[in-house]
Image: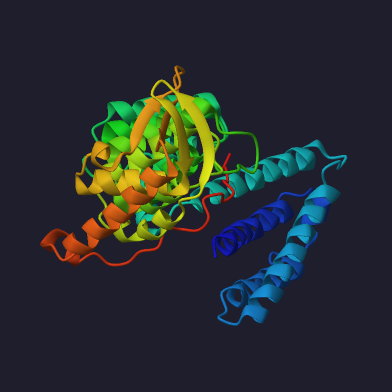
Amino acid sequence: MANFAISVGYWLLATGFLLALVVTLPAAAQRAPAVNPGVEEFRQRLERVTVAAASSDAAVRTRAVKTLAVLQQTLLDTLAAHADDPDPEVRARVAVLLAEIERDIQETHAVSVLGPALRQKFDKLRRARPDLCRTMLGLSENAKLAALRDIRRTTDRDRLHEPLALLGLFSRHTAVQDSAIEAVMLSTYTDPQIVHRLADLALGVRPTVGTIAPSTRAQAMHALHKLASPHAAGRLAAAACDVTRRFHTDRLALADAAVATGDKRLLLALLPKLNDTKSYSTFTTEAGPFTAAGSDIALYMLLKLTGQPLETYGLRLTSDGSPNTFLGFDSAKTRAAAVATYKTWWEQNKTQEKYKTIRPTPLPADNNNTVEFVD
């Protein structure tokens, strides 16, 4: 539906551009009737296709979207036909219209990432600060950085700057992303969209263009830990349990951010992960040889959430002398005993008042979604 919104918004404006082009052609071309029949037919057809694109019938919607693509090419071909017009006034007008179309497409695409709640705030803010909103919808990195500095200095009691912070998080520019993360932390914005976008950046999921800087990932992780919002707890916990992640320290940071949310639903969601006791890594530490298994990070989070000491279960946090921290057991036997002990503890305590109302919420299966940028 987001793509549909972009198409409709674009084409409603594009119709106006085509009308503007017709009435600004040289005098010879303006001998046509005041209402150009061809343009009026185009407008009426566009209205019909727009209605069809919102149909509940998938086949009707598909045909309408294809028609919109044809209309798009028609409009661009019409403009292109006058791009090299001998009349300099026509060439200048066409250049202006093409620039306006490009800007509108950019702005519409940017706004499309906002959900209904943030879109409502954005529309309210745009009436009060159109300059600030236009800047955050534009392409200039330096202008966005200036706007975000302005946002950080402003008291936002009504949290109207939340959508602008989200737009900054969707920027492809590292400096803009980092500045937006700082704005989020200073204002403690916890809208679900913002939290999930921070999770995208922290998890380093595949961007469509470019890369996510390691420093940005670390800063996003810090923000998630500080905000302690439950909205992304499941994603963080699932990523922490992903044994294909290269660095143990990264997985521990994800686990700590998930635990910081205090989301008790993780107590049920993580239980199946305790069955993954097969070792996948062996490492030598200051305390001797250790092994890591998929169950270890899940047990770590479960013990943290229930306030139990790791040492009681034989779960060890240690180092190999490098900045990296490792989590594991000194033997498979110790691990199996720890898992059995926790399962017994849970059976004995799950009826406590603070646990008995927890609803089962499975961990999300995919943490490798493609990240989209809006500039």
Q: Nearer the viewer, residue 25 or 49?
A: 49
Residue placed furthest toward the bottom: 57
Q: Where 15 falls versus 136 (above or below)?
A: below
Quadrant where the image shows the N terminus = bottom right
Q: Is residue 159 visible?
A: no
The residue closer to the viewer here, 299 or 12, is 299
> Image point 13% across, 62% down: which residue?
352
x, y percentage for residue 111? 49, 50
Q: Considering only vertical position in the picture, is 253 above or below 372?
A: above
Judge left or right: residue 76 versus residue 208.
Answer: right
The location of residue 281, given as percent across then percent down, is 53, 38
Q: Position of residue 124 (x, y in %)?
A: 33, 50
The answer to which image quadrant residue 244 occupies is top right
Residue visible at 73% across and 69% down?
66
Residue drawn at x 69%, y 70% as measured from the top left: 40
Residue 12 in sight in this render: yes
Instruction: Relative to 301, say whether 54 is above or below.
Output: below
Residue closest to the far left: 353
Q: Quadrant of the image for the C terminus? A: top right
